[in-house]
Amino acid sequence: MSINFKQSVKCPKCGELHDMTVWSSITVDDSADLKELLLKREINIFRCSSCETSALLPSPLLYHDKDKKLMISFTPCYDKLEKLQLFDNIKKSSKDSGELKSLEDYNLRFVSTYDELLEKILIFDNGLHDKVIECLKVLILTQEPEKAEHRVCVFGKCDDKELEFLIKDNKEGQFYTSKIPMSSYETIKEQLRLSGVKYRSFDWEIIDIDYGSSLLRGVNNNF
Ligand SMILES: [Zn+2]
């Protein structure tokens, strides 16, 4: 069930008060309209009608897609240590409540930015798995290792034949695209599976590019 509450939010720029509907939970099967709004970045985003300032509210949001057995816990956070603390809290409360037992076969993700949340939804909506995607990102970025430090790679789109990634170079201020054949995706997915990677979660997981890097280091012999 999707859950919201009303909150009065003060514009950080001009100080005007706005009454907002804040969503703390979105379940896709009974709220397809809310998912659409989320993908358009219209959920939990404050927009001031007086001065047009916009900002993401610091409220946590749980995204639940029963069909895809996907649950994403999103808490906006920009500090690495704080992020790990939030992640630990979620793992602990999920364990204490016994909730994990009812989420067998699920993929459980913790993310701390809106971009990550939307990317995860896009990846699973396309029938892909983020553990493979994060490894592909590492392989793409390490093609030019001297530039990898200031580049960010995100999943863009896919069809039957290939996957497209977007690369943003923060130093050059440029965007690039990189295409990977679907056959390579399938090969890597199988190699990871053979090396012990599970395509479901036994607990909440952070699956990001650091995860991809450590996975590739761990199964290096297979590549
Ligand atoms: Zn304002």
Image (cartoon, rainbow, N blue to C red):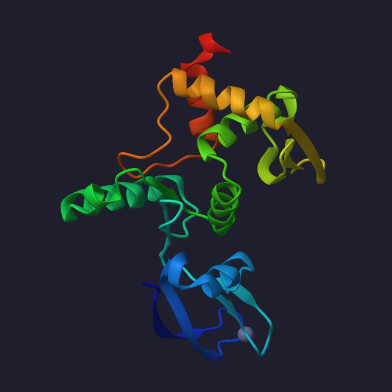
- On-image quarter of the C terminus: top right
Q: Quadrant of ligand 1?
A: bottom right
Whole-percent x and y of residue 73?
Answer: 40, 56
- Where is 168 relative to 15, above or below? above
Along the horizontal axis of the image, is 51 left or right of 55?
A: right
Whole-percent x and y of residue 76?
Answer: 47, 60
Viewer-nearest residue: 80 or 183: 183
Along the horizontal axis of the image, is 50 left or right of 215?
A: right
Q: Residue at x 40, y 73 (%)?
A: 2
- On-image quarter of the N terminus: bottom left
Along the horizontal axis of the image, is 51 left or right of 119?
A: right
Viewer-nearest residue: 165 or 217: 165
Q: Residue at x 52, y 19 (%)?
A: 191
Q: Residue at x 62, y 84 (%)?
A: 48
- Where is 73 relative to 218, above or below? below
Q: How many marks?
A: 0
Viewer-nearest residue: 83 or 195: 195
Along the horizontal axis of the image, is 109 left or right of 17?
A: left
Whole-percent x and y of residue 183?
Answer: 68, 27
Viewer-nearest residue: 164 or 58: 164
Whole-percent x and y of residue 108?
Answer: 39, 47
Does residue 44 appear in the picture of this structure?
no
Does residue 182 appear in the picture of this structure?
yes
- Where is 180 relative to 164, above or below? above
- Where is 222 relative to 129, above or below? above
Q: Residue at x 60, y 73 (%)?
A: 42
Q: Quadrant of residue 170?
A: top right
